[in-house]
Image: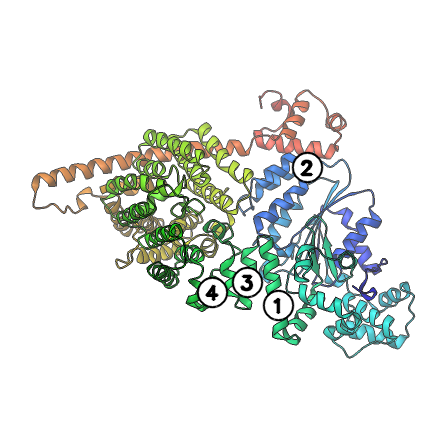
Amino acid sequence: MSQTISKQEKYYFSDKLKEQLSQISQYPLTIIEAPSGFGKTTAVREYLRNELPEASCQWYICLGESAPIAWLGICELFSRINSEVANNMKSLKMPTLDTLFHMTSYLKNLECRNKTYFVIDNYQLINFDMHRELINVFSMHEDPNLHMIFITQQLDFRQQLSIHNNNIHTIDASSFFFDKEGIANLFRMEGLRITENELENIFKNTEGWISAIRLQMINYKESGSFIYSAGIEHLVETAIWNRLGSVEKDFLLKVSVFDSFTAQQAAEILDHEVLPGKIEEELKSSDFVRFLPDKRLFIINGIFLDYLRNRFYHHQPRAYQKKVFYKAGISCAAMGQYCLATKFFYTIRDFDSILSLPFTRQYLDSQKEECDEAMFVEIVRECPEEILCRYPSAIVVFGHYAHLNEQHEIYKKLCRLLRSLMQNKPNLSQEEIRRFNAELVLLEVLGEFNDITKMKEGYKKARDILEDSSDIIEHSTPWFSVFPTAFGIFWRESGKLDEMLNTIDEIRPFYRSLSQGQGAGLGHLIRAEAVLSKGEDNEAEILCHKALYEARTYRQFSICIYAELSLARIFILRGDSEKFFTAIKNIQSFATDYSDPSIHRMVDMCMSIISLTLGVKDYVAPWFYNIEGIRKLLYAPVIPFAEIWYFRLLLIDKRYNELFAFSQLALDTLRNSGAKVQYMMPQIHSLIFLSLAKHKSGNDLEAQMYLKEALAIALPDQVYLPFADYDCMTNLLTGINICYFDNPMKSAPSHKNQKETFMLNSFDALTELCKRQQKGISTIRKSLIQVKSTLTSREREIALLAKERLSAKEIADKLYISETTVKTTLRNVYSKLDIHSRSELATIEF
């Protein structure tokens, strides 16, 4: 860029701002909140660099990444001073209101030997609903050497940081505005003398906003005059844009289509193999372009970016724009950012480029938050059919994606196109035709979901077409296990559970021949879920281990995670705390070991289910707290199952009227006899929730009416476990008359007696399982409380020294920490061990 926008080496800060900045070192946490262009980051950076040169300063800059990724980045800051605290915080994934107190205890173990400053910049970009609550918790860390700084633009009004906390220092936008004296000093620092009248006009024109003042200053240096009547856009034009050369203008216009960009992307858009060194260096030294070395990203200042985009979209010819969008798409594709590339290509309706991208079902699943479902729908609607037919692989992938998002019109269109393509014998090899014929069959099998008998016929037909083993399903998402209850997904008719399980077994050899290991272990897992629902935990555990063995062999991590979930539920039923915690650890290890977003989503789901089964919210993922979050992250076929656990949250929170309303709506939808998909399990749960809502509201008569309906569906197949998770269920069941259940075999007295005997035995087994489950839940919950109160390594170290009769000062000197930290830690120890003095501490083991 030209000299006019090169980075200035000198900065002037008003006395008011310097006074505010000087207080950062006096508080555990500081919030700096002001709009874009106020110089927040520059002020903090220069303050830390010039006033605290000996301090350790660590930055995390949010760039709009997903909330869990941003949280990991923030946690990583703490690994510099205490890896145990960092790992404990990472284990929270994203904290919820119910797990924030865990953070408080973790943070009390921090100890910095030197002055340390953590800066979280662009905090407003974290897609999180608890900005204020999280900051409050961070402010309670109690380490006198640690100071946290949160730099943020103004947040949504629901998340405003109007915090009244003595641990928090707030610097708002008012501190960044310059008064007339400050403006005069800024100009003098640059060697410029202005008259009183000019100063008055500058102050009036800019209202003390530093970005506008600097633009006026640049304009004055170049032209010797000010532009008092101009708005900020005109100032940008006269101070920056008009001073750039044609090459620089062209470059900046082109990269303005990116929110942020790398040097390689910039080179691609300029038709260079690498970005010319001169341009890269000028970018790094520009006042209006920010470079993030750790991410190798450039970000154009928001004011300047708005100006550039206005010129790009409103002042450039369409041909110029199309070329830029195409190049931008190519650059994103080269970096594997296919969804972003699609957005650029779709802008210019370049369908060939979109359909040429190497999309897979697995990729679309892993990028579900980034890939805009509505955009893909419009692509299929608008794209000429002759172009679509040139890309049969894309038809298959988009067809699966459309079905999983309940875009039935698009799904049917893509099936029709692929069927027509195969009938017309396209210009494909015989092997390709055979493969796509099998893909067509499998795509149409989706339309028979969840009719397992028809699905079996489809898998058999696909196997017969391919004749031998194929990788046709190898790289696809295991769509039938995108929520951890494959058994519930396929059980569609009361009284037909065993028939469904037998059909699953019959499908397995057909599917195995198509998949080369995809979905390995699922058959065992489905049967494990089914027998566990009957209370047969020993057989269920054996099946889970079989599922794990097969799934591990083929690296089917989703099946492994879901098998561990079933084991956790088995150990809850037994009240086996040791094995329960082992299963929990195994589930959580997948999130630690693998970065795939779909793996993290599965772990979130399983931990949420386990937590809610126990009637607590400690491990519930943030996106489980609202229907919109669930629908955003999960595919349509499994949303009814996810809603079950959302309803559990409503029950725990005693929001009975909402629970009744949502459960009734869900039941009405599920009972649509005309729908191809029929689910029994969500119907049972919805009826149970309706029963519980009425019971909690004091209407036991209606509660039992709904409960009878649920039992009428569940008892013929001995599905007991859904009833057993609630402590009031035994009392509700006591009021049920087993003779209520109608017998369809009235004409056969002997059969009628058999039926009555079966129902009575089932009812007894259900009641017994409810008692057993509640006993197991009680045991595990007590163990959870004990785990929460376990001493950390630092707390144990200090407690042992205290037990040896060392004083607080002696402990502090021995461990190189402050005496205040020792006393605070001992208070935590006493609280966790439920004791009140050192004499009591000396008498117990820990």
Q: Position of residue 172 (x, y in %)?
A: 72, 60
CB of mark 2 within 8 Å of CB of mark 1? no
Which numbered disc, 4 or 2, marks the residue that appears first in the sequence?
A: 2
CB of mark 1 within 8 Å of CB of mark 4? no
Q: Characterize the local packing of mark 1: few (<14), some (14-19) or many (20 or more) Cα atoms within 10 angstroms.
A: some
Q: Amino acid at mark 2?
A: Leu
* Residue on which the image places disc 2: 110
In three-dimensional space, the C-alpha distance between marks 2 and 1, rounded to whole angstroms, equals: 53 Å
Image quarter of residue 503: top left
Instruction: Please give left or right for residue 18 compared with residue 387 in the image.
Output: right
* Residue on which the image places disc 4: 379
Q: Amino acid at mark 3?
A: Lys
Q: Amino acid at mark 1?
A: Lys
Badge 2 marks a residue whose secondary structure is loop
Residue drawn at x 40%, y 53% is 429
Can you tell which of label 1 and label 4 is closer to the viewer? Answer: 1
Badge 3 marks a residue whose secondary structure is helix
Q: Nearer the viewer, residue 740 or 491?
A: 491
Q: Nearer the viewer, residue 135 or 655?
A: 135
Q: Amino acid at mark 4?
A: Ile
* Residue on which the image places disc 3: 343
Which numbered disc, 4 or 3, marks the residue that appears first in the sequence?
A: 3
Which numbered disc, 1 or 3, marks the residue that appears first in the sequence?
A: 1
Residue drawn at x 84%, y 76% is 226
Which numbered disc, 1 or 4, marks the residue that appears first in the sequence?
A: 1
Q: Characterize the local packing of mark 4: few (<14), some (14-19) or many (20 or more) Cα atoms within 10 angstroms.
A: some
Q: Nearer the viewer, residue 818 or 399?
A: 399
Residue 303 showing in the rendered view: no
In three-dimensional space, the C-alpha distance between marks 1 and 4, rounded to whole angstroms, equals: 20 Å
Can you tell which of label 1 and label 3 is closer to the viewer? Answer: 1
